[in-house]
C-alpha cells in the first residue's frame, strides 16, 4: 500500500476532488479515475510530500485535460489548478514554490566571492590547523567563497560555534561592514541560537572590532521576513528585499518548502545564505524536505560536521543506533545497566514518575506569590529541565491523556491543579500564530501571579532572552503542555526527556521521529515503549517525495 493511501481524506479534500472532476470534461470511468488521482494528491500533500508520482496511464489521462498545465508544452498556462511536471503531479501553488526555489538556489549556488581570507583571524579561529583543516575550517572557507552554504551535523557537533567562526572570518575579511541576520523557525530555537552565539563569542578571544560587529540576537523567521496583518505574504520579498548581507537560519530542517521559497526570494542580490541543521531529524511539518534536498543537490556548498564536542556519550550512542535502525542494539542500550541516563521506563511506573517530577516543579512555583524576574527565569529553567514527548496527540499514551492524568495526580497530592482551569505553574503551548501579540505556534508560556498585582498572567521567554507576560484572555489557542508531541519539540532542548510511544502501531512512527525525540535531551533519556512497537518505528522511514532535486539539476542544464 502506498504511503499516501494511508492518509484519510478530509471533507475539504473530497469536495475539492469532486469540484475538479465536475469541471474536467470527463465522464464515466475516466471521471472516477481523475477524482481518485486528485484525492491521492491531497493525501500526499497531507503526508508532507510536495507532489504525487503518477503512472504512465495516469500521465496520459492528465495531459489531455484543460485543468492540468503540462510543463514544457507550448500551450501550458499558469492559470490551471494542477501542474504535471514529468511524472509528478502538483497543485499549482506547490509547483510554483518548488520551481522558483530551484531556479533561485541554482543562481545563488553558482556565484562566487573573491575576498581573501584574513590570515590573522584564521590563526585565532583555527590555531595550528593545516590548509586542509577541520570541518569547521572548511565551512568557514567555503562561506568566504560561496553565497550558499549548508552546515549539517547532529547534536553537539558544534554547529553554532562553526557559524560564529564563519561569521568572524567574513567580518574580518570584508572590505565593508556586514549586516548579519540570525533567525530560526521558532521562538525557542531563536532563543537557543542567541544564547549559543553569546557563549561562543565569549570563548573565542576575537579582536574587539570583530566581536562588536557580530550579531547577538536571533529572531523568528516570521519576524525576519516581516509579518503583514491578514496576509499570507511577508513584507520582504524580491520587490523589497532584506537589508542583510548575510542571513543565518538555524534548525533549517524545520523550514518547509513555502517558507524557504519566500526566504530565498527575499534575499538581496550579492548576499549570503547560511543554513544550519540536522538532516536526520524530522522534516518540516508542512510540505517538503528542503534541507535534505539541498544537501544532496549542492555537495560543494555543504559541509558535514562529524566530530562531537558537547553531547552526552550515552545519548549519542543511543541516537546513533536509532539512526542506523539497529533495534536490537537500541533495546540493549535501554535495558542494560551500563548507562544510568539512558533507560526504559515501565508503563506501570509512568504516572508515579511524572507525579514526582512535576510535583516538585509545581510545589516550587506555588510557593512564590509575587515572582520577581529572577524567579520567573528560575521557573522556566526548572520546567525546561524535564519534558514528556509523545508520538501522538490522541491515544491512551498520547498528549491529551497524559496531560489530563498528570493534572489529576498533582491535584490528588494537594496541589492547585484543576484540569482546564488556570493555576500558578500551569504550562501552556501556543498552537496558532498571533502576529499582533508576537506569539507563535510552539511557544511555551507559564501561568504565574503578576508582581504588579494584576492577577494571573502567562509569561513567555522571548528570542532575545527577555521576558514578557500576556493577559490570559488575550492568548491565542493553546493547550496544557506537561506533555507535547515530538513534532512540537523540534528546535527545543531539555535536560531530561521521557519519550512515550503508543501501545499500537501508528503511521506517524518512524526512525526520524524517535531520533528527533532522543536528541532533544541534554542529560537523560527514558523511553516508554513496547519492544515490538519500538522495532516497527526504528525500521520505518518516511522519505518525502519532491521534485526539487530534479528541478535544480534541470536549472543547471544549458537551455
Image (tube, rainbow, N blue to C red):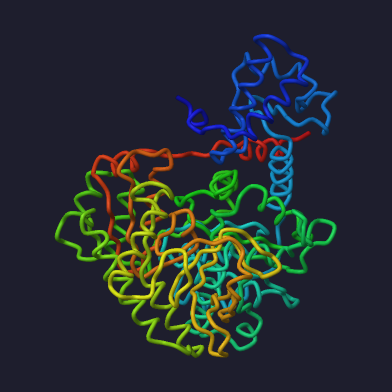
The residue sitting at 77% across, 27% down in the picture is: 69
Residue 364 visible? The answer is yes
The quadrant of the rendering that contains the N terminus is top left
- 33 w.r.t. 459: above or below: above
* Quadrant showing the C terminus: top right
Residue at far left of view? 337
Instruction: State the image quarter where residue 557 is shown.
Output: top right
**In this picture, residue 448 sits left or right of residue 227:** left
Q: Position of residue 449 (x, y in %)?
A: 50, 83
Q: Quadrant of residue 361?
A: bottom left
Rendered residue at 49%/67% (across/down): 428
User: Which is nearer the eye, 118 or 11?
Assistant: 11
Place of residue 305 in the rendered image (x, y in percent of width and height, measured from the top left): 45, 60
Residue 534: where, in percent of width, then height? Answer: 29, 44
**Viewed as shown, does residue 41 lie left or right of 115?**
left
Residue at the image position 28 percent from the left and 68 percent from the top: 355
Seen in the picture, residue 299 relative to 424 is either above or below; the reply is above
Q: Nearer the viewer, residue 211 or 357?
A: 357
**93 sits to left or right of 428:** right
| Image coords of residue 97 (percent x, y) | 71, 44
Amino acid at each position: 500500500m502506498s504511503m499516501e493511501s494511508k492518509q484519510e481524506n478530509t471533507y475539504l479534500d473530497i469536495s475539492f476532488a469532486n469540484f475538479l472532476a465536475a469541471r474536467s470534461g470527463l465522464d464515466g470511468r475516466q471521471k472516477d479515475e481523475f477524482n481518485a488521482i486528485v484525492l491521492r494528491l491531497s493525501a500526499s500533500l497531507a503526508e508532507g510530500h510536495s507532489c504525487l508520482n503518477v503512472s504512465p496511464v495516469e500521465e496520459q489521462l492528465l495531459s489531455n485535460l484543460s485543468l492540468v498545465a503540462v510543463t514544457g508544452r507550448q500551450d501550458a498556462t499558469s492559470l490551471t489548478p494542477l501542474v504535471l511536471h514529468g511524472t509528478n503531479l502538483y497543485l499549482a501553488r506547490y509547483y510554483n514554490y518548488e520551481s522558483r526555489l530551484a531556479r533561485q538556489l541554482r543562481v545563488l549556488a553558482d556565484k562566487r566571492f573573491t575576498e581573501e581570507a584574513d590570515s590573522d583571524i584564521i590563526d585565532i579561529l583555527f590555531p595550528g590547523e593545516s590548509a586542509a583543516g577541520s570541518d569547521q575550517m572548511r565551512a568557514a572557507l567555503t562561506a568566504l567563497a560561496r553565497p550558499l552554504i549548508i552546515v549539517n551535523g547532529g547534536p553537539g557537533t558544534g554547529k553554532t560555534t562553526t557559524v560564529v567562526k564563519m561569521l568572524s572570518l567574513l567580518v574580518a575579511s570584508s572590505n565593508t561592514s556586514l549586516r548579519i541576520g540570525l533567525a530560526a523557525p521558532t521562538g525557542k530555537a531563536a532563543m537557543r541560537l542567541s544564547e549559543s552565539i553569546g557563549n561562543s563569542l565569549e570563548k573565542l578571544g576575537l579582536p574587539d572590532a570583530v566581536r562588536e560587529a557580530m550579531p547577538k540576537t536571533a529572531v523568528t523567521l516570521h519576524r525576519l521576513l516581516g509579518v503583514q496583518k491578514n496576509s499570507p505574504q511577508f513584507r520582504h520579498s524580491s520587490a523589497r528585499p532584506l537589508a542583510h548581507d548575510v542571513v543565518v537560519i538555524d534548525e533549517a530542517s524545520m523550514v518547509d518548502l513555502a517558507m524557504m521559497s519566500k526566504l530565498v526570494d527575499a534575499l538581496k542580490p550579492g548576499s549570503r545564505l547560511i543554513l544550519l541543521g540536522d538532516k536526520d531529524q524530522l522534516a518540516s511539518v508542512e510540505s517538503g524536505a528542503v534541507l535534505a534536498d539541498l544537501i544532496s543537490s549542492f555537495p560543494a556548498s555543504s559541509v558535514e560536521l562529524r566530530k562531537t564536542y558537547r553531547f552526552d556519550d550515552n545519548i549519542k550512542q543511543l541516537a546513533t543506533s536509532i539512526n542506523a535502525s539497529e533495534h536490537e542494539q537500541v533495546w540493549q542500550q535501554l535495558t542494560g545497566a551500563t548507562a544510568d541516563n539512558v533507560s526504559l521506563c515501565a508503563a506501570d511506573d509512568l504516572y508515579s514518575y511524572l507525579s514526582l517530577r512535576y510535583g516538585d516543579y509545581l510545589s516550587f512555583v506555588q510557593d512564590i506569590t509575587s515572582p520577581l524576574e529572577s524567579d520567573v527565569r528560575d521557573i522556566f529553567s526548572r520546567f525546561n529541565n524535564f519534558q514528556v514527548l509523545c508520538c501522538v496527540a490522541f491515544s491512551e499514551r498520547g498528549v491529551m491523556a497524559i496531560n489530563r492524568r498528570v493534572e489529576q495526580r498533582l491535584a490528588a497530592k494537594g496541589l492547585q491543579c484543576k484540569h482546564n482551569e488556570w493555576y500558578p505553574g500551569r504550562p501552556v503551548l501556543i498552537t496558532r500564530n498571533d502576529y499582533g501579540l508576537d506569539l507563535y505556534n510552539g511557544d511555551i508560556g507559564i501561568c504565574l501571579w503578576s508582581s504588579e498585582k494584576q492577577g494571573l498572567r502567562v509569561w513567555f521567554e522571548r528570542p532575545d532572552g527577555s521576558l514578557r507576560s500576556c493577559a490570559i484572555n488575550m492568548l491565542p489557542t493553546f493547550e496544557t503542555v506537561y506533555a507535547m508531541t515530538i513534532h512540537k519539540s523540534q528546535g527545543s532542548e531539555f535536560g531530561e526527556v521521557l519519550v512515550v510511544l503508543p501501545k499500537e502501531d501508528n503511521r506517524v512512527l518512524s526512525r526520524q521521529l524517535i531520533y528527533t525525540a532522543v536528541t532533544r535531551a541534554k542529560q537523560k533519556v527514558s523511553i516508554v515503549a513496547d519492544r515490538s512497537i519500538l522495532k516497527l518505528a526504528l525500521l520505518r522511514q518516511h522519505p518525502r517525495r519532491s521534485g526539487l532535486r530534479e528541478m535544480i539539476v534541470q536549472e543547471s542544464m544549458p537551455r
